Image: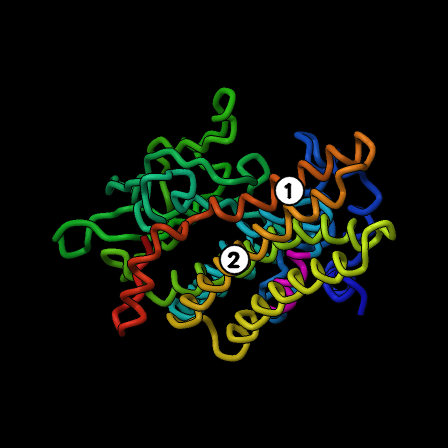
């Protein structure tokens, strides 16, 4: 198959019309503040992509989802990243369905059937805090838990129907605190979105009452993950990798279509990009074969960092080969290059995971920095 043909065929099968709609719009229109991308994603039924078919979803496999994210990233990187955060939240809910039974299944079906979008508040904008260090706290009120705090999701703050966030709560035995996951409707009293400048996507919770059944305690402790969070984070690494590989693939595609570029250069970039995708597909197949356990999460991290290294070679070479384009095309190339390089910024960054992965290699538990 031709470059990206398999990925775009997967989008056509699961989200009919979406790729055609995105292809018809200029890149910078899709990446601008008034982008129609999120609405096009909704219109195609994208929020239910990962939900099982018997829960009103599209039943996409991990391999399907990886290919969808790469295809979206090649058309509009911002949409790919935004929807990855939604899928991360959905994967967490699907994991909840395996541990909480009817409650989890009801939540998954509600999101899929309602075509709802979820933003994630897992401390992703706090460079000095790990994923398991929530910015939210909960106190017990007369009618249930009250959540307070601020989070700055990567995206979807203004489009979300729900916020899924980590929160510290008092242990049921009164001995300290523990990590929980809360699902907060966007219309909740006390929830606001806004701010100034760079803080315009800030989500603030001020004594937001959460139904007790929408606050799920986990067994995560001192950086260790329970089954629920292990699944969510494995999906996150996989799909974020695919999204940024998609942005880099947009550059590679431009090189491949330029007959002025020597064949050796075109094939060299093709080999790098497809090799990176094959590595990611291996993780996706592991998830599909047996569900994401600790070893799968470790592999997803290794592959993510491997893809980062591949992109550090592919992106600058593609930019160099495309250097004599007209100004509009040159601006797009520069923008795509900047986007593709941002995979290195997503938590957990490699420098923070060096120690935990080294410990895991000698039979220690996998911890997340």
Who comes first in sequence, dot 2 or dot 1?
A: 2
Q: CA distance from mark 2 to mark 1?
A: 29 Å
Give how far across and how far down residue 205 sits, in percent.
Answer: 38, 34
Please tell me whether residue 330 is drawn above or below residue 254 in the rendered image: above
Q: How many marks?
A: 2
Name the residue beneath numbered marker 1. Answer: 337
Residues shaded magenta:
63-70
Give how far across and how far down residue 289 sits, in percent.
Answer: 53, 79
Disc 2 crowd, CA 10 A, few/some/many (<14, 14-19, 20+): many
Secondary element type, mark 1: helix
Residue closest to the eye, 100 or 86: 86
Quadrant holding the N terminus? bottom right
Between marks 2 and 1 in the image, the one whose residue lies nearer the viewer: 1
Q: Please give the name of the residue rendered at 48% of the width and 79% of the height, measured from the top-left corner.
A: 290
User: Is most of the magenta stretch helix, strand or loop?
Assistant: helix
Q: Which mark is residue 90?
A: 2
Q: Please give the name of the residue rendered at 45% of the width and 33% of the height, measured from the top-left corner.
A: 203
Q: Please give the name of the residue rendered at 47% of the width and 60% of the height, measured from the top-left corner.
A: 93
Residue closest to the eye, 252 or 27: 252
As for residue 313 lying within the magenta part, the answer is no
Give how far across and how far down residue 159 sits, in percent.
Answer: 59, 38
């Amino acid at each position: 198959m031709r470059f990206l043909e398999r990925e775009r065929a997967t989008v056509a099968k699961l989200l009919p019309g979406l790729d055609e709609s995105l292809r018809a719009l200029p890149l910078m229109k899709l990446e601008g503040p008034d982008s129609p991308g999120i609405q096009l994603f909704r219109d195609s039924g994208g929020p239910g992509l990962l939900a099982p078919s018997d829960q009103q979803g599209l039943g996409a496999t991990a391999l399907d989802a990886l290919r969808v994210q790469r295809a979206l990233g090649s058309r509009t990187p911002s949409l790919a990243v935004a929807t990855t955060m939604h899928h991360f939240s959905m994967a967490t809910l699907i994991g909840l369905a395996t541990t909480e039974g009817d409650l989890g299944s009801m939540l998954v079906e509600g999101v899929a059937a309602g075509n709802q979008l979820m933003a994630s508040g897992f401390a992703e904008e706090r460079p000095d805090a790990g994923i398991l260090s929530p910015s939210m706290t909960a106190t017990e009120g007369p009618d249930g838990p009250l959540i307070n705090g601020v989070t700055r999701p990567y995206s979807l703050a203004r489009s979300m129907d729900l916020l899924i966030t980590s929160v510290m709560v008092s242990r049921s035995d009164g001995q300290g605190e523990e990590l929980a996951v809360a699902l907060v409707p966007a219309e909740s009293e006390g929830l606001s979105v806004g701010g100034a400048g760079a803080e315009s996507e800030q989500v603030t919770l001020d004594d937001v009452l959460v139904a007790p059944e929408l606050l799920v305690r986990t067994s995560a402790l001192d950086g260790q993950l329970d089954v629920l969070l292990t699944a969510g984070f494995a999906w996150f690494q996989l799909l974020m990798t695919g999204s940024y590989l998609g942005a880099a693939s947009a550059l590679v595609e431009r090189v491949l279509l330029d007959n002025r570029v020597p064949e050796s250069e075109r094939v060299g970039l093709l080999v790098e990009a497809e090799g990176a995708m094959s590595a990611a597909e291996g993780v996706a197949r592991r998830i599909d074969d047996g569900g994401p356990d600790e070893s799968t999460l470790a592999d997803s991290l290794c592959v993510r960092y491997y893809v980062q290294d591949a992109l550090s070679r592919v992106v600058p070479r593609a930019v160099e080969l495309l250097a004599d384009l007209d100004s509009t095309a040159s601006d797009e190339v520069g923008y795509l290059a900047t986007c593709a390089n941002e995979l290195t910024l997503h938590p957990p960054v490699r420098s923070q995971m060096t120690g935990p992965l080294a410990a895991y290699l000698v039979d220690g538990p996998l911890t997340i920095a």
